[in-house]
């Protein structure tokens, strides 16, 4: 199997495992990490596909995505801290006052 | 297209005869309660005027040919329905009878109802009834006829329920109305058939006959069902005895003289519309009714009930006559019956009134077993009652005899020589001829002759009540309708009918039969015991014939009683069935239909609960759900 | 392409972005003001920003783009479609400012964030390039996450966390999808011919997967099933004006880009994917889930959240028809939706200012004491249900007629199902839309009532919205005619 | 001389003005409402004086209202189009009359008069408007406009279970109107104005919709469209939807269960309006919209329609027989009577249609009277249970006289308006099998049972409540006879019932032309069955 | 050849580190594993001729994001009783969903025409190219990202410090 395929499978794996982390792990920050992983999977794709094409669109897009990731991380951490202030935990499942009551 | 009427003298006459009773009733209703005593006077006076006018009208008509007027009432689908009047000799004499008897009953009621609080309503309804009855007689449009037909029913309902605190009275009224209603539905369907096939309801209109034979028969049968209801024929006759709950004068007017006769009148009026089968049906129904009624009358102890059953029997006789094509006879008998039966009822009313006067209220004044020996105490009542009874029994020199002659003659000719079902019908006529004298005699004997159980110190009814009785009694003497007792030709030219020559054999036979009947009756009833217990007395068995006759009649009476019960129970059953079924439907309403709707609502809520349960507050499961949805979506689209 | 031309093109494009520039300016200024001004003078900020929104509103009207202009070398395109939506955004921002009431400490940031969201919405509506799309989307999302927490209490913190996590995952999916699409089309400009040529009748499954991953992000924005679960929690926890804002501006922005995206991916009907069916299915599920979940809901804001899920389903109907008219009607509906939604939330806000409303039962009997707000609420609810005499009825009528027509043309059964589901759900929706007016007028109050504070200005505000609703019912021709002018091509 | 618009908008305008009057002057509102009703009566008299007996539409007012550019589909056009023909005139006359009575009977309303009378006025305008409207959208708007006032009138001023009743009423009716809306949407898309050139102009104008030539070729509702959904063509489906939508309002079995609850809970004036006017919209809708627009479907389904009518007649009557609550009994009797209307319509003969319209009118009068009567008793005692009364006739003489009149009128006694309508319907239904072969004879014959049952339950009620020894359970207040206000309400109704029973031509002058035109159009407009 | 080996090495690293994040319970280890993962990814970028990107990745992620996260971990896990704990829940559905997603992706990729042909990018300084692109074609996104950063900064600052304000 060629290098491209391998790398694509890697990115797919990264994406899915990032998602899995985001869905399963019991710490908001680890969830955040999972999301970062997903973004990086996207980056890997972009660079990989860009590698076969002329123009730098893919790489530039990846660049912007890194910026976006940073912003998300910052905002995310801020929000997590705030929630932590109220709930004294960063376990998403324990932060569940808002729900359907019946 | 209907010609505009020319407003002649007789037109105004007709109109006033029709309207005056209405005016009377309206004026009664508009009277304040506290001057209620005015009501009887007003209405009686107005009725007097009306009946005088009716007499004038009668002679008008009988001199000139028949007159007819009609006004377009409304147009439906370009066809006109007219309020039309047809006056021929039959109609005019019926009008005469109705007005006169109504007047007399009014008169009687003044005395009879003197203590009643609701005189206003009573006389108002009487007036209204008279109006409706006259309309019914006059109109020659089936729809109009039907309308008045229903109106008389309503007024009868209201009058039966006059003693509205009495449960039994109300029940009787309701029963009467409902049974009538069944008949009326038949009538209505008949109308519908006629309209939708011929597009007209004018009785005279030839188009009525130009409809398919089947539908013509059907229409005839339906209308006859109406007659069955109204004039108490088998199987709808047992409202009439109950209707006796009403005031006695009412029974005299409505349930003896006029309303119940309306059916017979209608039969004659539209006899040209009937097919052979219908006639057959009519005849058979009549014969059954007449025998059943007679036997019923034989075993009643309530004076009014006896009269009621006899009315049924007589009506049956008339209907049978109509069915057998003995139109004139039947009609003639109808007129006579109006007189003598009204007379009988008034007499009964007088007796009851008298009994109520002496305050022995603990015993039932209507039970003939409690009566007796009133001959001396109430001479006038006795005489008039006796005359009317004689007429009912068909004893010579009375009107009843004459018309019964006529019927029997025509029946025998109709029955023909070779044996057929007609013979059965005819024979029933003879049976009635035999039975009628018996129960009549029984009545007279028990009331006036037999030794009284209790000492009554009663005195004669007031004059105002006596006059009508006397009038009616004289009316039911043969003189009025025929100058010679046996031969009645003179009566014929009075009512331009052409009667067949009386068959002297028949009259002879009938006289003989009546004689036998009277003898037997006297023989049976002369000793006291019969009065209190059952009819069969030991020495009765001697006479084989009578014995046989008695057994038979007993059986029959049981049968008829059973029949009565049966009919009653059937009707009750139906009503109960309806009510229970109605409850079931009500339940269905509450639980099935609504339940369905609610069910939908609940299921919607349930689904909602499921969808909402996704939002369990755990963000990661939200994500899981969302992604799962996405994946499912992708898979669905891809493969 | 020569660098020089590009630069000149860029400097030329600046001129077309006047409203956005004004917005950026106001953002900076309000930041400075927030630093300079004393804490109790900050009402000035609201007035100022409201003024700027109005200003940019009129700037758009004044420079109405009659033919589309491509900006920044195809990064964005300013056409009347996007201009229309930009008008709606600014209107929404304006109304939000009118009903907002923040604590002094936070109000400058509040306004900055709203500015940022509006800016992002405008750019999103115009963007023609995935990069642009992602950035402006983030420019909407991140401030929204933070705004959701602006009640500064336990609940709203949780709400914003959930919003954030959900949103970022959705965005990540979208980005991944874009990367896939990029791999196939080797361009990021989804309006370019290259994009279309590359993808036209390509049966590559990866394309489908990519498209769906992209949809994930957009569905999250417009809160449609299956990415709707965040809505109730956020709506419940966030301050009401913010909810009003979030339920309109980001949703409509998402709707605009969703439309563009779907049309782009539909490739003029050359696509292998049955986009009409897909959108219809999404719409059907959204309507059903939204309405049914709202049925037994007792918290008014959660209820409205579900209702807005259903509403986005109704909005999607117009797109599902895949016809110009359908999209016009969708835009009409969007305009009406903005009005009625703001009406409802404004009244709700007014109620909440004086009494604490945890459950609809708190409304019991209030209609007697304070008739006018109650009446306004009633009318808003009627409009949301889609009954006359409100513009909500007209909007639904038009939407459904477009649906019927496109069923006539392509008798695909899904559209008929959508038709039926939509209309039946109008009845279902009544159950809960009527719940609050029912309590307001029909119920006897449980406890002693205090008449709620009604400011004259607030009443005037409601009155204007009510009048608008009725006006557009009586005379929809003008607005609709104007929308009909809008002819956009990709 | 915009008489119709005046008739419609005077009440609505007054209501809007009355919003400004402070609630302190509560007593003024009822006099305002009364004044409006009286003005309406005057206007009605003017209209009658101008109206001549020819068929077709009179007093036409047509103003362009909504005109929306649908881009490539052409133009959406809705008009403010009101006019009167025999049908709508009789209905409008009825409405004005009944609304006057209802206003008088609202005199005793104490609770929040302002709101009550404003809602009443709005309802008034909406009712008359939807009877006059000839533009389907306009009709629908007025139709929906009736719902909310009704909802609140029942829900606020109603009885014990008022919330349940009002919600139920509202949802049922809304469901119906949604079904109607579906058809409206489908219709206006597939109908164009005859004068529309290459640019198609979609119209809501009912008269255009009734003309099959205006159907856009190969649209789903065009006569030649071969597309089927299930086993029916779309025209048939559309007819069925309209039919169900309207018989929910009628109401016919099995969509009738909202009626008893609504009636039992509603305050007297409101149940008067509900029974006398709102129920008529079911039949009115069938006669004005469903039948003329889809004649082929109407003829195809007429057997079914007749059957529904028959079932309603019998079923309603049986339920009335079983109900213990006076108002409930009357409500079910309404179901039964409106079943007659449905039967008459199904027969599609001139007699049947005439009878149906006549029955609508007479039922309007009589049911109003019945509900007023029930209300009188309820005002006295606050108890409607039949079983709790006996022998009222001896205590309340005049009252029971009116009861007797009303009951006999309602059970179809000749001489009252009810009888005329029913007998015409029977004529029509029976001869339908020979004239156009739509509904079989046995339906007509079975339907007569309705009369018998009617007599049964009314007489039984009289027997239980009014005759017999006087006794009243759990009632403290002594029963007083009618007061003058109640006379003013009841007497006109009784007289009307009598007059229209004795002089049917008064009304037939208006109905006859309508009926004959209706039947002609039904059969000439190019479809299969012809007599 | 050498490149190949390094590439496979990086791939291996990243996979392993991801697995570590998935499976271990200690947040710190997760953070470090993420770090290695990102570094190896940046290596891969480098091999794919995206040097600038690789560097950015190193700087921003390793330098910025990770530090941020570790701060976060410190701040959030200090007070709570059981620190550094992160056990995981709803594994099965999660694995189901993600696994199927992975399968879908793989299958989709297998029969999608993404050309595996190596057309080399024009050799030369990609970094400068990127710079030019940023200034020309991607000017608008560049500006906007700046704005985005600003807004996020303000918002985050407020959010993170809001509870103090809320108290005051």
Image (cartoon, rainbow, N blue to C red):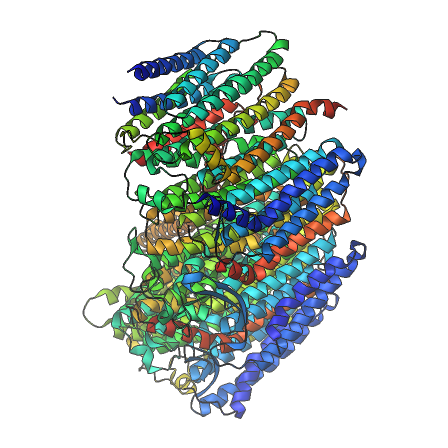
Q: Position of residue E139 (x, y in %)?
A: 51, 39
Above or below residue B327? Residue C37 is above
The residue depicted at 61 percent of the width and 79 percent of the height is B48
Q: Quadrant of the C terminus of chain A?
A: top right
Residue E123 in view (yes/no): yes
Rendered location of residue B305, percent (x, y) = 49, 57
Query: Position of D216 compared to B372: left or right?
Result: left
- In the picture, measured across the screen, residue B19 lies left or right of residue C171, that is right
The image quadrant that residue B335 belongs to is bottom left
> Looking at the image, is E7 positioned above or below residue B1?
above
Image quadrant where residue D494 sits: bottom right
Q: Identify which residue, B501 or D53, lies in the foreground.
A: D53
- Residue E125: image location, x then y, percent: 42, 29
* Quadrant that contains the N terminus of chain A: top left
Residue D419 in sight in this render: no
Write down the quadrant of residue C103 in the picture.
top right
- Nearer-the-camera pick, A75 or C363: A75
């Amino acid at each position: 199997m060629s290098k491209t395929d391998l790398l694509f499978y890697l990115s797919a794996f990264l994406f899915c495992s990032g998602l899995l982390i985001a869905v399963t792990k019991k710490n908001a920050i680890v969830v955040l990490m999972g999301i970062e992983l997903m973004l990086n999977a996207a980056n890997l794709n972009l660079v990989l596909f860009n590698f076969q094409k002329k123009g730098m669109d893919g790489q530039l897009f990846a660049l912007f995505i890194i910026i976006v990731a940073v912003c998300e991380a910052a905002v995310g951490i801020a929000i997590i801290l705030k929630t932590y202030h109220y709930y004294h935990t960063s376990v998403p499942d324990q932060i569940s006052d808002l729900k359907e009551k019946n | 297209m209907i010609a505009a009427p020319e407003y002649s003298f007789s037109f105004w006459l007709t109109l006033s005869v029709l309207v005056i009773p209405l005016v009377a009733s309206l004026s009664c209703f508009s009277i304040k309660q506290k001057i209620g005593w005015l009501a009887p006077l007003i209405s009686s006076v107005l009725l007097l005027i009306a009946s005088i006018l009716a007499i004038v009208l009668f002679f008008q008509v009988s001199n000139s040919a028949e007159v007819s007027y009609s006004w377009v009432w409304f147009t439906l689908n370009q066809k006109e329905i007219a309020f039309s009047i047809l006056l021929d000799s039959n109609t005019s004499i019926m009008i005469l009878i109705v007005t006169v008897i109504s007047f007399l009953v009014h008169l009687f009621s003044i005395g009879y109802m003197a203590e009643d609080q609701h005189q206003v309503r009573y006389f108002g309804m009487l007036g209204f009834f008279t109006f409706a009855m006259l309309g019914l007689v006059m109109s020659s449009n089936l729809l109009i006829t039907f309308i008045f037909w229903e109106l008389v029913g309503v007024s009868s309902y209201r009058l039966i329920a006059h003693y509205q605190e009495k449960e039994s009275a109300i029940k009787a009224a309701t029963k009467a109305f409902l049974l009538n209603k069944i008949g009326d539905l038949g009538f209505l369907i008949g109308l519908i058939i006629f309209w939708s096939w011929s597009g007209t309801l004018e009785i005279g209109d030839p188009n009525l006959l130009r409809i398919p034979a089947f539908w013509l028969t059907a229409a005839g049968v339906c209308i006859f069902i109406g007659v069955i209801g109204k004039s108490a024929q088998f199987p709808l006759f047992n409202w009439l005895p109950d209707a006796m709950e009403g005031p006695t004068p009412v029974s005299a007017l409505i349930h003896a003289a006029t309303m119940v006769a309306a059916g017979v009148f209608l039969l004659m009026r539209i006899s040209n519309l009937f097919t052979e089968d219908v006639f057959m049906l009519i005849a058979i129904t009549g014969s059954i009714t007449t025998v059943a009624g007679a036997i019923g009358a034989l075993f009643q102890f309530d004076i009014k009930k006896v009269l009621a059953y006899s009315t049924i029997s007589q009506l049956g006789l008339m209907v049978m006559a109509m069915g057998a094509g003995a139109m004139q006879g039947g009609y003639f008998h109808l007129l006579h019956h109006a007189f003598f039966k009204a007379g009988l009822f008034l007499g009964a009313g007088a007796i009851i009134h008298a009994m109520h006067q002496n305050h022995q209220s603990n015993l039932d004044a209507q039970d003939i077993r409690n009566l007796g020996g009133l001959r001396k105490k109430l001479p006038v009542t006795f005489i008039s009652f006796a005359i009317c009874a004689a007429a009912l029994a068909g004893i010579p020199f009375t009107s009843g005899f004459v018309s019964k002659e006529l019927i029997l003659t025509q029946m025998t000719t109709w029955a023909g020589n070779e044996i057929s079902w007609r013979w059965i019908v005819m024979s029933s006529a003879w049976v009635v001829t035999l039975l009628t004298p018996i129960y009549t005699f029984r009545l007279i004997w028990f009331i006036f002759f037999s030794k009284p159980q209790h000492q009554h110190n009663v005195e004669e009814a007031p004059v105002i009540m006596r006059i009508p009785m006397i009038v009616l009694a004289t009316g039911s003497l043969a003189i009025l309708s025929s100058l010679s007792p046996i031969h009645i030709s003179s009566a014929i030219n009075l009512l331009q009918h052409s009667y067949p020559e009386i068959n002297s054999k028949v009259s002879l036979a009938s006289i003989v039969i009546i004689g036998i009947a009277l003898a037997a009756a006297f023989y049976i009833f002369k000793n006291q015991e019969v009065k209190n217990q059952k009819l069969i007395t030991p020495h009765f068995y001697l006479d084989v014939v009578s014995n046989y006759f008695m057994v038979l009649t007993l059986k029959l009476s049981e049968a008829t009683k059973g029949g009565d019960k049966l009919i009653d129970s059937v009707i009750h059953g139906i009503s109960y069935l309806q009510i229970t079924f109605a409850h079931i439907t009500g339940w269905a309403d509450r639980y099935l239909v609504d339940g369905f709707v609610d069910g939908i609502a609940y299921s919607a809520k349930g689904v909602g609960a499921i969808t909402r349960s996704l939002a369990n507050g755990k963000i990661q499961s939200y994500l899981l759900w969302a992604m799962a949805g996405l994946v499912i979506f992708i898979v669905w689209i891809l493969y | 392409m020569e660098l020089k031309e590009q630069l000149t093109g860029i400097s030329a494009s600046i001129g077309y972005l006047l409203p956005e520039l004004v917005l950026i300016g106001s953002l900076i200024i309000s930041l400075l003001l927030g630093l300079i001004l004393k804490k109790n003078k900050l009402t000035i900020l609201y007035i100022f920003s409201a003024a700027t929104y109005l200003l940019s509103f009129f700037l758009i009207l004044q420079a109405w783009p009659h033919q589309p202009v491509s900006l920044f070398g195809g990064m964005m395109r300013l056409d009347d479609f996007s201009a229309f939506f930009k008008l709606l955004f600014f209107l929404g921002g304006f109304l939000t400012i009118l009903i907002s009431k923040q604590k002094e400490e936070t109000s400058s940031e509040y306004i900055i964030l709203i500015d940022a969201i509006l800016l992002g919405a405008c750019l999103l509506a115009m963007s023609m390039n995935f990069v642009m799309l992602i950035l402006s989307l983030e420019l909407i999302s991140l401030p929204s996450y933070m705004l959701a927490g602006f009640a500064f209490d336990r609940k709203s913190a949780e709400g914003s966390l959930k919003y954030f996590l959900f949103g970022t995952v959705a965005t990540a999916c979208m980005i991944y999808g874009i990367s896939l699409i990029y791999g196939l089309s080797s361009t990021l400009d989804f309006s370019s011919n290259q994009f279309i040529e590359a993808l036209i009748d390509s049966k590559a499954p990866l394309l489908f997967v990519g498209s769906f991953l992209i949809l994930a992000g957009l569905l999250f924005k417009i809160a449609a099933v299956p990415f709707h679960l965040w809505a109730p929690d956020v709506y419940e926890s966030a301050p009401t004006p913010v909810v009003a804002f979030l339920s309109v501006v980001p949703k409509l922005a998402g709707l605009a880009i969703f439309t563009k995206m779907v049309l782009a991916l539909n490739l003029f009907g050359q696509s292998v994917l049955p986009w009409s069916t897909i959108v219809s299915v999404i719409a059907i599920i959204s309507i059903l889930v939204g309405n049914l979940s709202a049925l037994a809901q007792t918290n008014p804001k959660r209820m409205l959240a579900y209702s807005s899920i259903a509403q986005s389903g109704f909005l999607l109907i117009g797109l599902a028809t895949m016809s110009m008219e359908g999209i016009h009607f969708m835009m009409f509906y969007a305009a009406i939706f903005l009005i009625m939604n703001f009406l409802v939330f404004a009244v709700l806000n007014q109620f909440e200012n004086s009494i604490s409303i945890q459950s609809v039962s708190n409304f019991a009997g209030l209609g007697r004491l304070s008739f006018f707000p109650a009446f306004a609420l009633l009318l808003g609810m009627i409009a949301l249900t889609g009954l006359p005499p409100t513009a909500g009825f007209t909007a639904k009528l038009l939407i459904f007629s477009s649906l019927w027509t496109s069923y006539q043309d392509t008798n695909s059964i899904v559209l008929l199902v959508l038709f039926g589901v939509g209309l039946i759900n109008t009845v279902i929706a009544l159950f809960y839309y009527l719940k609050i007016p029912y309590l307001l007028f029909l119920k006897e109050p449980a406890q002693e009532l205090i008449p709620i504070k009604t400011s004259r200005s607030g009443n005037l505000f409601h009155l204007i919205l009510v009048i608008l609703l009725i006006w557009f019912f009586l005379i929809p021709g003008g607005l609709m005619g104007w929308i009909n002018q809008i002819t956009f091509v990709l | 001389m915009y008489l119709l618009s005046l008739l419609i908008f005077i009440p609505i305008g007054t209501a809007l003005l009355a919003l400004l009057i402070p609630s302190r002057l509560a007593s003024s509102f009822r006099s305002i409402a009364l004044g409006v009703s009286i003005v309406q009566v005057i206007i009605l008299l003017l209209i009658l004086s101008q109206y001549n007996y020819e068929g077709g539409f009179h007093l036409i007012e047509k103003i362009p209202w909504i005109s929306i550019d649908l881009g490539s589909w052409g133009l959406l056009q809705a008009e403010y189009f009101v006019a009167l023909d025999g049908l709508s005139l009789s209905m409008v006359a009825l409405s004005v009359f009944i609304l006057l009575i209802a206003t008088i009977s609202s005199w005793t309303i104490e609770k929040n008069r302002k709101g009550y009378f404003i809602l009443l006025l709005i309802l008034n305008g909406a009712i008359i408007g939807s009877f006059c409207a000839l533009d389907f959208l306009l009709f629908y708007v007025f139709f929906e406009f009736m719902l909310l006032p009704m909802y609140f009138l029942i829900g606020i001023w109603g009885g014990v279970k008022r919330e349940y009743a009002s919600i139920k009423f509202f949802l049922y009716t809304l469901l119906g109107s949604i079904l109607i809306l579906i058809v409206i949407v489908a219709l206006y898309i597939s109908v164009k104005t005859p004068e529309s050139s290459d640019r198609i102009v979609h119209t809501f104008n009912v008269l255009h919709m009734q003309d099959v030539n205006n159907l856009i070729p190969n649209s789903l509702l065009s006569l030649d469209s071969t597309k089927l959904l299930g086993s029916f063509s779309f025209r048939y489906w559309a007819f069925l939807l309209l039919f169900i939508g309207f018989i929910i309002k009628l109401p016919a079995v099995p969509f009738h269960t909202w009626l008893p609850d609504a009636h039992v809970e509603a305050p007297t004036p409101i149940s008067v309006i509900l029974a006398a006017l709102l129920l008529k919209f079911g039949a009115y809708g069938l006669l004005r919209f469903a039948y003329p627009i889809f004649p082929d479907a109407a003829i195809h389904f007429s057997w079914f329609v007749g059957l529904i009518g028959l079932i309603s007649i019998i079923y309603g009557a049986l339920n009335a027989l079983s109900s213990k609550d006076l108002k409930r009994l009357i409500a079910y009797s309404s179901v039964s009577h409106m079943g007659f209307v449905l039967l008459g319509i199904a027969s599609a003969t001139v007699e049947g249609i005439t009878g149906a319209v006549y029955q609508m009118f007479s039922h309007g009068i009589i049911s109003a009277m019945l509900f007023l009567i029930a209300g009188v008793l309820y005002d006295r005692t606050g108890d409607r249970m039949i079983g709790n009364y006996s022998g009222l006739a001896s205590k309340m003489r005049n009252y029971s006289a009116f009861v007797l009149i009303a009951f006999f009128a309602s059970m179809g006694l000749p001489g009252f308006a009810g009888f005329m309508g029913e007998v015409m319907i029977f004529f029509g239904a029976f001869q339908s099998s020979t004239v156009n072969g739509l509904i079989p004879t046995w339906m007509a014959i079975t339907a007569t049972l309705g009369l018998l049952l009617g007599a049964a339950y009314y007489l039984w009620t009289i027997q239980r409540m009014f005759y017999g020894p006087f006794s009243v359970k759990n009632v403290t207040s002594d029963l007083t006879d009618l007061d003058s206000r109640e006379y003013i309400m009841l007497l006109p109704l009784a007289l009307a019932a009598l007059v229209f029973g004795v002089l049917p031509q008064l009304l037939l002058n208006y109905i006859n032309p309508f009926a004959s035109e209706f039947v002609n159009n039904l059969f000439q407009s190019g479809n299969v069955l012809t007599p | 050849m050498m490149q190949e080996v390094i590439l496979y090495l990086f791939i291996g690293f990243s996979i392993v580190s991801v697995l570590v994040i998935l499976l271990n319970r200690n947040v710190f280890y997760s953070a470090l594993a993420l770090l290695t993962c990102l570094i190896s990814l940046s290596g891969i970028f480098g091999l794919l001729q995206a040097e600038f990107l690789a560097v950015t990745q190193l700087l921003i992620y390793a330098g910025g994001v990770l530090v941020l996260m570790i701060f976060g971990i410190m701040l959030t896990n200090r007070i709570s009783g059981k620190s550094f704990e992160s056990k995981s829940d709803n594994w099965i559905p999660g694995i189901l969903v993600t696994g199927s997603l992975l399968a879908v992706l793989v299958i989709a990729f297998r029969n999608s025409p993404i050309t595996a042909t190596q057309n080399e990018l024009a050799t030369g300084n990609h970094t400068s190219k990127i710079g030019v692109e940023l200034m020309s074609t991607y000017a608008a996104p560049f500006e906007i990202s700046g704005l985005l950063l600003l807004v996020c900064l303000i918002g985050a600052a407020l959010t993170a410090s809001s509870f103090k304000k809320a108290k005051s």
